[in-house]
Every structure is written in C-alpha cells, then in structure tokens.
Image (spheres, rainbow, N blue to C red):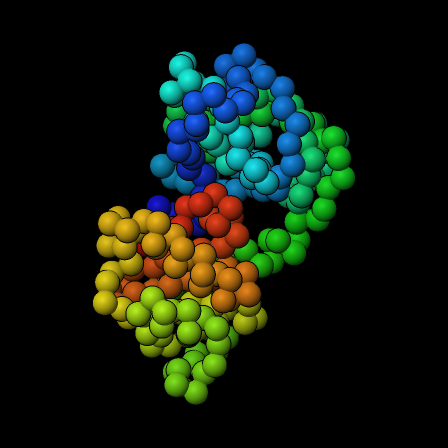
C-alpha cells in the first residue's frame, strides 16, 4: 500500500522469498561485509513505518541471500536500507558500486529488514534521468480529481488513439476509457475497465497481475504510470516496483 505524500517510493519492509538451501549467503547478524552494485534511492516515509523517515535505500542489481537461523530460513533481499553513509559521498541517488557491513535491523523500524553501513567503491551515475522517468506526481488533497491538479491533456477518443499500452491492456481484456497526462505529458493515468477487479487479480493471481503491470510498463516506454479502475481504485507502477518484483502498488486516498 502507498499513502498520499510518498513521491517516489514508499518505505515498507521487503522480505523476499526463501532462498535455496545451500545457496551462498551473507551473514547480516555477524555484520558480514559485501560489495554490490545497485541504485541508490531516497524515499519518503510511509505513515505506517514512522521510524523510516527519509530512508536511503540501495536497490540491488541482483538480490542477495541472507542467512537465517537455519539453512531453511535463508531468504533473499532485493534492497538494503542505508544505515550509515559518509557525508563526503555527495550523492543521494544514482547507480553505484558500493561496499559495507551488513546488519540485521529490527522489524518494522526501517525501510528494509537488512541494513548496510555504506561506502562507495566505484563510479556513480546521476539519478536525474531515473527520477524523471519514475517519479509520481506529488499528491495535494483537493487539487483536481486525483490530487495532481488539472491534467495537461485528456484523451477521450480512444478508438483514434494509437499507443502500445492500449494493445497491451486489450491482451489482458481491459479497455481504456480515457487517458489523462500530467507532469508536462510524461506521467499517464489510464482509466480502465475489465472483467476482473485489479485488486482481485493481485490477491488471487499475483504472478499474472505482476506480469500485467510489467507489460504495461514496457508498453509505456518504461515510464511510471497509474491505472484507475471502474471502482475508482488507483494503482501505480514504475521501475522500482519492477526491480523489486512488487507488481502494482495501490494508492490509498
């Protein structure tokens, strides 16, 4: 779930699936050392995790295995909460090669269940382009129907509108009723109608709904987007959700 006010990525605990027994794993409880590449990303706090304000997250290029109490309890994580980082680093987002000491974090207190004392060990790249393509508009209550203000453009004649997203949604048996664009035309909101509620797909056929979210993202040229279903429920998706394997994230008014 995502609350209003989370601009790019909500802060929530990510506890991934169990890893294969015998897979090489890092020991967070022993503050194991690691070197990994990923995308350094600042996120705003979620009201449900008040201690995670201004969390700095390292979204890993490749998930890593963390040791549990037994091999059967080993698990994978796709992102690490940056607990410490040198003030001299001078970077808050971008692609990095980083190293540091892992540590297990108390559940519910941080944006991830595993943290890292970070130091940069390789070149970094600006996160501006990533942010531009993956940011959601800032929600302001009472400013327009969605809280984004007035749309830059509203497309009603969907029959005459040609876009890969229309075909992709049709493959999933969803019809677009209208499209609104914001942020100078870079963020699209698709109002859709289909034979199933998206929330139903997420709960009953999660893998199918995750693939649907990712296919729409690809058809939207890898730009963040939002769906609004017939019941008015809102779902967002961007590159972070794709990398984390979350699927649609619902936006709660």
Relative depth, front residue between 158 and 210: 210
Quadrant containing the C terminus in the rendered view: bottom left
Name the residue: 51% across, 66% down: 220
Q: How many marks?
A: 0
Q: Residue furthest front?
A: 22
Left or right of residue 144: residue 195: left
Relative depth, front residue between 171 and 243: 171
* Residue 114 % position (x, y): 49, 26
Residue 29 drawn above or below residue 218: above
Determine the image quadrant of residue 120. Answer: top right
* Residue 107 % position (x, y): 39, 24
Residue 134 drawn above or below residue 105: below
* Residue 221 % position (x, y): 55, 65
Name the residue: 45% across, 39% down: 11
Residue 169 drawn above or below residue 30: below
Q: Is residue 144 visible?
A: no
Left or right of residue 94: residue 75: left
Name the residue: 49% across, 67% down: 219
Left or right of residue 168: residue 203: left
* Residue 232 % position (x, y): 28, 64
Name the residue: 29% across, 58% down: 198
Q: Is residue 193 visible?
A: yes
């Amino acid at each position: 779930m995502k609350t209003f006010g989370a601009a790019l990525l909500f802060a929530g605990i990510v506890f991934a699936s169990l890893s294969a027994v015998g897979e090489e794993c890092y020991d967070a409880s022993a503050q194991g050392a690691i070197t990994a590449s990923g995308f350094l990303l600042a996120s705003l706090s979620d009201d449900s995790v008040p201690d995670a304000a201004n969390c700095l997250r390292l979204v890993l290029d490749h998930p890593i295995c963390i040791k549990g109490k037994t091999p059967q309890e080993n698990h994978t994580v796709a992102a690490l909460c940056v607990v410490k980082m040198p003030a001299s680093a001078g970077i808050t987002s971008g692609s990095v090669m980083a190293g540091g000491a892992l540590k297990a974090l108390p559940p519910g207190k941080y944006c991830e269940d595993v943290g890292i004392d970070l130091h940069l060990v390789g070149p970094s790249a600006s996160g501006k382009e990533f942010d531009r393509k993956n940011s959601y508009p800032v929600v302001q209550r009472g400013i327009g129907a969605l809280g984004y203000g007035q749309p830059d453009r509203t497309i009603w004649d969907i029959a005459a509108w040609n876009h890969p997203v229309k075909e992709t949604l049709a493959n999933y048996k969803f019809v677009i009723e209208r499209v609104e664009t914001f942020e100078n035309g870079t963020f699209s909101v698709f109002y859709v109608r289909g034979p199933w509620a998206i929330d139903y797909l997420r709960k009953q056929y999660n893998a199918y709904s995750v693939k649907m979210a990712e296919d729409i993202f690809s058809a939207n040229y890898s730009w963040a987007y939002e769906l609004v279903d017939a019941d008015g429920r809102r779902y967002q998706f961007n590159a972070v959700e794709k990398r984390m394997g979350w699927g649609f994230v619902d936006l709660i008014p």
